[in-house]
Structure formats: C-alpha cells, structure tokens
Image (cartoon, grey):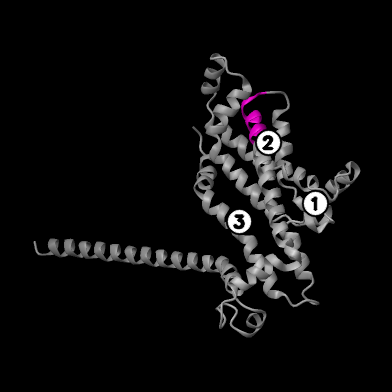
Amino acid sequence: MSTQPTARHRRSDTGRAGGAARRRGTSAARLSTTVLLFAIAGYFLLPIWWLIVSATKSNGDLFGSNGFWFGSHLHLADNLTKVFRHSDGVFGRWLLNSLLYCGAGALVATLFAAMAGYALAKYPFKGREGVFAVILGAVLIPPPLLALPLYLLASSTGLVNTYWSVLIPSAVTPFGVYLARVYAEASVPDELTDAARVDGAGELRIFFTIALRLMSPALVTICLFQFVGIWNNFFLPLMMLADDSRWPLTLGLYFWNSQLRDQPWYDIVVTGSLVSVVPLCIAFLALQRFWRSGLSAGSLKS
C-alpha cells in the first residue's frame, strides 16, 4: 500500500523533470537561433551602415575617424551638393539614365515574360517542353558571358554607343519566363479562360484582362528582380557605351573611383554610392508584400 504512491510520485517527478529539460532545450535553441539571425543581419547591414556614416564625413574625417561612427561634423548636405555639381552635374544625367534603363527594361521584360510564360503554360503545341528546356538552360548562363556576343551583334547593326544597345538586352529575362509559366499554371484556371472564350473574348483580351490580373504578384516579382539586375549591370554598359552622357550610375561611379589616385574626391564617390542605393531600397520597400506573395504562391497548386 505504501509503495504505490511512492512509485507514482517518482514517475510524476520524472515527468516534470523531463518537461523542464525539454523547455530549457527549446529556450536554448530559440536563443541560439535568435543570436545567429542577428549575426547574419549584422553581417549584411554593416556595409550599409558604413556607407551611411561615411557619406556624412569630409575627406579628412574619412581617414581620421572611426569608420563606423560619425565624424566631428555632419557634411551630408555638402557632399550631396558636390555630387550633383561635380563635372557639370553629370551625376544627375547618370541617375536618369539608370532610371531609364531600369524602368523601361524592367517593364518591357515583365510584359514579354508574362506573355511567354502564359503561352507556355496554357497553349499546348509541339515542342513546348523543348522550348521550356532551352529557357531553363538560358537561366544558368551568367549574363557577362553574353556581353561579347551582344556587342558583336550591336556592332553589326550600328547600335553601339546608343541607348538601344543597353535597353534591348535588358528586355529579356529567362528567369522571368520560367517564373511566369510556373505561376500561370497555378493561378490561371483553364475553366476561367474557357468560359471567357465561350463568351466571345479573344485571346489577347483574355490575357490582358484576366491572366495579367491573376498573375500580378508574380509579375511584380519579375519586375523587381529585373529592375535590380539592370541597375547593378556593369559589364554590358562598359562594352556598349563610350559616351559618358549615356552611362548608368554603376559605370559613372566606377569611372570616378578609377580617378581617385589623381583627384582625392573620396567623399564624392562614397556619397554617390549611397545615392545609388536609395532607388533600390525604395523599390524593395514599396513592392515587398507583392514580392513575398509572388515567391510563395508560385510554388502552390490550386
């Protein structure tokens, strides 16, 4: 009679001890995960913090003060004035060129990718999978490898040193076609398009009034990826453009940086680099909710 409660109490104590151990293990795992995530975030944010701090310093403070903290005086307004007035205000022209290349290229590339992806997803034809396999292969090719063939093609057609030599290649995105096809298969039901055909709608009307709206999260994702890719593109404009009035920001800042040995305008280069990051930040902040939904919804089946 006296041993049964003792054994029961022992089992209860063992269970409570095991539960406490599991809770301690879970808390330790959460803490280590949190610390790891903060370390990764710090690793990615530290260069941005350095860029922000450095853009507020003069040339003397850049080399005579702590690199990760502000100097004795804030010179951000003066540095911005220098950037936009330097070399007769060519930085503003470079900024407009980058916006032109990225805006027009991303919009046209998104439209072409949506049309191609929708066609590959909804129109059965002979060789469709072969075409899609070629597109997947194009995704694996690094863009710099195509710069020389594109230059030879532009040279033979007289497009070198023109805006078209950068805009036309920017209108092609194999990854966008892949993503558009995957998303069209998941989000555009065949029953809906068949009902539209029964009502007398043509294929173009179905695409522009129905398919584009249903594919909008993926299209925003494609547009954002293409915008960032064109904005960071360096090798193609370097080969195509000789006139500095047509350069994008990446090429212009590289030119300024290459002259630092002769002209000590480090504050101008650093501040210009900060300004070049601002449009990308604005694009991500404005489109991040569409970006997240586009990445996740394309992986689900309806």
Mark 1 / mark 2, whichever is N-terminal = 2
- Judge depth for marks 3 and 1 and give the one in front: 3
CA gap, disc 3 to disc 1?
Answer: 27 Å
C-alpha gap between disc 3 and disc 2? 24 Å
Mark 3 residue type: Pro
- Residue at 58 percent across and 82 percent down: it is 66
SS category of the residue bearing label 3: helix
Residue farthest toward the right in the current orientation of the protein: 156
Q: Earlier in the sequence, mark 3 or mark 2?
A: 2
The residue at which mark 3 appears reads as 279
Disc marking residue 112: 2
Q: Which residues are magenta?
A: 113-124
Pointer 1 local density, CA inside 10 Å: few below 14, some 14–19, many at least 20: few
188 or 80: nearer the viewer: 80
Residue closer to the observer: 23 or 226: 226
Residue 55, visible in the rendered structure? no
* Amino acid type indicated by mark 2: Phe
Determine which residue is flagged by label 1: 145
Is 137 magenta? The answer is no
Label 2 crowding class (10 Å Cα cut-off): few <14, some 14-19, many 20+? some
Q: Could one spot residue 95 in this view of the protein?
A: yes
